[in-house]
Image: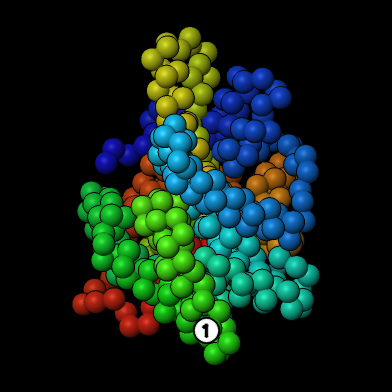
């Protein structure tokens, strides 16, 4: 894999110029580019931020609605509607998988931090419980334990970190070449072993609950596995529900948490704030707009840019780096820059506000644009780190990471 320009000195394009290059488009489109890339312009503010509970309700309804519309199209008696269903299915499946991930990795995540509702509210726990059942994620108790451990300075990004441990166990580990790391990531993304293990772990964790809650999980599983195909057929259910909920959900999770931090590159940061910050970075979905350098771009250059935007960057934003994930470094560094974690619904703008204020813990120096740069940034550091002792098999009891 060739080292991206953003990771080299020669010919480097300043990262801030990537978002600024979108100013080639009309001013009224800039809020849209901010949402699609995850990166605001300097001093940009959100137009409107709904209460997290309202956003959650809208996203749950949108997920149900997307599945319902796709099922309707795929089972329609009209040929043209069925054909339309198959045409839009790839986009709809990625969109639905992203919504299901967002329900867990955004709303479920902030519920266990007690920032979805007011601190101390029972609603945080109740909603977290309901959401983990809805998307068949790791149960909220285990998730909370593992995720809060992830935030501990004595654990963060080390082998004791659940996300890092999962990557290690699937061959994404320090001391290996970039080519090996890329191969192992791609192999894992399409590995039946990975997907079966991940799905099995999700279901088993979801069933580790008190008896009444177990009954709810069993009923929900019966609806998903028996009732839905009985009503809509196996083919339509597989496309509109099973694939987004299983394989695509799990591929999204792997891409998200494999690029989330610089993993397994040394001892835990402990009290060293600089080390902690260096393992965090912003991740944005886009690339420099043609002509930003003053040259007149050809039609071919524009066509390539639009194809990459429509078929790579936007799917990454709606299917993988959902919600506030582009500014996940801000989530870890908010306290260090004097911000409140409760401002997470505006995380991308809060991150930019910290940069604009000059008190950003260096976040502007760690901005990665495009999935290639995100993967390369992590793998370059991992390949340069010392190898760790291998294990013969997956650690017993290790839960699939939620990547948040």
Q: Which residue matches tag 1?
A: 214
Is residue 28 visible in this depiction of the protein?
yes
Q: How is the image coloured?
A: rainbow
Q: Position of residue 391 (x, y in %)?
A: 24, 76
Question: Can you say which quadrant of the picture contains the N terminus?
Answer: top left
Left or right, 174 with respect to 279, comes to left
The residue sitting at 55% across, 67% down in the picture is: 134
Q: Looking at the picture, does residue 59 appear above or below residue 82?
A: below
Is residue 252 visible in this depiction of the protein?
no
The residue sitting at 36% across, 73% down in the picture is: 200
Q: Position of residue 399 (x, y in %)?
A: 41, 75
Q: Looking at the picture, does residue 361 appear above or below residue 386?
A: above
Q: Residue 119: which quarter of the image?
A: bottom right
Q: Position of residue 189 (x, y in %)?
A: 31, 55
| Disc 1 element | helix
Q: Residue 7: which quarter of the image?
A: top left
Q: Nearer the viewer, residue 231 or 386?
A: 231
Q: Looking at the picture, does residue 295 appear above or below residue 123?
A: above
Q: Nearer the viewer, residue 238 or 329?
A: 238
Q: Looking at the picture, does residue 210 appear above or below residue 383?
A: below
């Amino acid at each position: 894999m060739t080292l991206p320009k953003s990771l080299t000195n020669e010919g480097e394009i300043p990262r801030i110029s990537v978002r600024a290059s979108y100013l080639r488009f009309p001013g009224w489109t800039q809020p849209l580019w901010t949402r699609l890339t995850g990166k605001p312009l300097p001093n940009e503010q959100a137009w409107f931020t709904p209460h997290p509970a309202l956003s959650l309700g809208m996203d749950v309804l949108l997920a149900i609605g997307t599945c319902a519309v796709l099922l309707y199209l795929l089972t329609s008696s009209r040929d043209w509607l069925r054909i339309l269903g198959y045409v839009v299915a790839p986009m709809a499946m990625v969109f639905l998988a992203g919504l299901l991930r967002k329900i867990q990795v955004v709303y479920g995540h902030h519920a266990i931090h007690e920032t979805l509702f007011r601190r101390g509210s029972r609603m945080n726990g109740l909603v977290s419980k309901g959401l983990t059942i809805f998307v068949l994620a790791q149960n909220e108790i285990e998730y909370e334990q593992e995720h809060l451990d992830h935030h501990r300075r004595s654990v963060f990004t080390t082998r004791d970190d659940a996300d890092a441990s999962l990557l290690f166990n699937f061959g994404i580990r320090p001391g290996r070449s970039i080519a090996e790391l890329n191969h192992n990531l791609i192999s894992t993304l399409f590995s039946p072993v990975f997907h079966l293990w991940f799905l099995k772990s999700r279901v088993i964790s979801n069933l580790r609950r008190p008896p009444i809650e177990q009954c709810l999980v069993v009923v929900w599983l019966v609806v998903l596995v028996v009732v839905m195909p009985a009503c809509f057929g196996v083919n339509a259910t597989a496309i509109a529900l099973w694939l987004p909920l299983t394989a695509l959900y799990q591929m999204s999770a792997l891409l998200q948490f494999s690029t989330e931090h610089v993993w397994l590159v040394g001892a835990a940061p402990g009290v060293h704030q600089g080390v902690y910050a260096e393992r965090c970075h912003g991740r944005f979905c886009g690339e420099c707009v043609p002509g930003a350098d003053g040259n007149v771009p050809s039609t071919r250059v524009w066509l390539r840019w639009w194809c990459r935007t429509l078929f790579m960057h936007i799917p990454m934003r709606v299917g993988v780096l959902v919600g506030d994930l582009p500014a996940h470094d801000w989530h870890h560094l908010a306290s260090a820059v004097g911000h409140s974690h409760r401002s997470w619904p505006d995380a991308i703008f809060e991150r930019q506000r910290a940069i604009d204020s000059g008190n950003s813990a260096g976040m502007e120096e760690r901005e990665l644009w495009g999935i290639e740069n995100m993967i390369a940034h992590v793998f370059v550091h991992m390949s340069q780190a010392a190898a760790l002792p291998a294990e013969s098999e997956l650690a017993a009891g290790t839960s699939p990471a939620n990547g948040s």
